[in-house]
Amino acid sequence: MSQSVIKSLVVLGLLLAWFIFLVIALIRNYKNIPKNESLRIGWQMTLKNFSFFIPFLIIQCIVFHIPEIITSLATEQFKIPGLSLEVFPIDKASAYTWIMFVLKLIVMAFVATSFISTALSLLDNKKVSLQKVFTDRISVKNILFFVIACLIYKLLVVLGLFILVIPGIIIGVMFSLWPFFMVDKGYGPIKSLIESLKTVQGINVWDVFLFIVLCSAINVGGLLALGIGLFVTIPLTLIAFTQVYRQLTMSSQA
C-alpha cells in the first residue's frame, strides 16, 4: 500500500472520528456544562457587538499572520527598479527560524489574550473598544507568562500523544482552561495550569472535550460559508467557551 493511500485513509479516519464525536456532542445531555445557555449568550453578544467584532477580527487576522508575512518576505527576492534585494534567506539562517518561532508565540499570546479579555469584559457587561481591548490585561509580563504556559502545555500534550493518542487528548482537555485563568485571574503559568487541572478534574472531562468539538464544528461551518461566517462563529464560540469557564469555576468554588 502506497504512502499516499495510507495518508488518505488516516485523514478519512480522523474525519470520521470527528464527525462521530460531533454527533455525540449535539445529542449529549451535558450535566456540568450549560451548552445551550452558553451558545445562546455567545450568539446574543455577538449580534449585539457585531460592529465591534468586524474591525476587531480584521486587525487580529492581520496581526496573527505577521510572522507568515515576514517569512514569505524573507524567502523571496524583491525586484525594485535598479535594485535586486534578497531579504535574509531563511534556509541559510537557523537563528532566523528560531526568531520567527518566538515571534509566532508572542503574536499568538497577544491575539489570545485580547480575545479572552474581550469575552470576559462582555460577560461582565463592560463596554468594549478597540483601544481598550488591545491594552487591557496586556503587558510584557503577561505575554511572557502566556508564552511559557503555552510551551509547557504543548509539551505535556505532545508527551501524551507519544505515549498513546488518548492520553494526549485527555491532557489537552484537562489543561485547556489555563489561558482563561491567566487572563482573568492574573495567575502565573504553573498556577494557571494547576487551576485548570483542578477545575476540569471536578467535572466530566468528556463533556468539556465534546463542547470543544462542538465549538470547532461551528467554526468549520463559518469557514465553509466562504470564510465570512467566521466573523460570527469565532466570537460566538469564544464567548460561549468563556461562559463555560465562568460556570465551571463557580461550580468548583461552590
Image (tube, grey):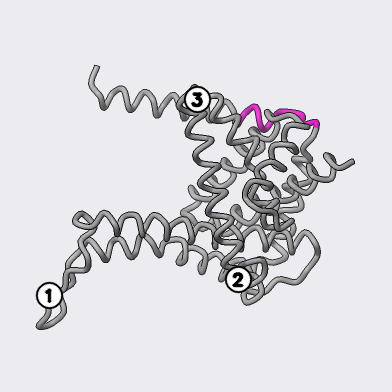
Most foreground residue, 150 or 72: 150
For numbered disc 2, what is the local secondary structure? loop
Q: Earlier in the sequence, mark 3 or mark 2?
A: 2
Alpha-carbon neighbours of circle 2 within 10 Å: few (<14), some, or many (≥20)? some
Q: Amino acid at mark 2?
A: Phe
Alpha-carbon neighbours of circle 1 within 10 Å: few (<14), some, or many (≥20)? few
Q: Amino acid at mark 1?
A: Ser
Residue underneath mark 3:
165
Where is residue 117? Give x, y as percent: 67, 62
Judged left or right of residue 217, residue 106 is: left
Residue underneath mark 1:
84
Question: In which quadrant of the rendered image does the N terminus lie?
Answer: top left
Q: Residue furthest bottom?
A: 82
Residue 134 is tagged as 2
Where is residue 59? Give x, y as percent: 51, 69
Mark 1 to mark 2 CA distance (whole Å): 38 Å
Most foreground residue, 218 or 186: 186
Q: Earlier in the sequence, mark 1 or mark 3?
A: 1
Which residue lies at the image location 80% right of the left edge and 31% below the top edge?
31
Range of residues picked out in magenta: 22-31
Alpha-carbon neighbours of circle 3 within 10 Å: few (<14), some, or many (≥20)? few
For numbered disc 1, what is the local secondary structure? strand
* Mark count: 3
Q: Residue furthest right?
A: 254
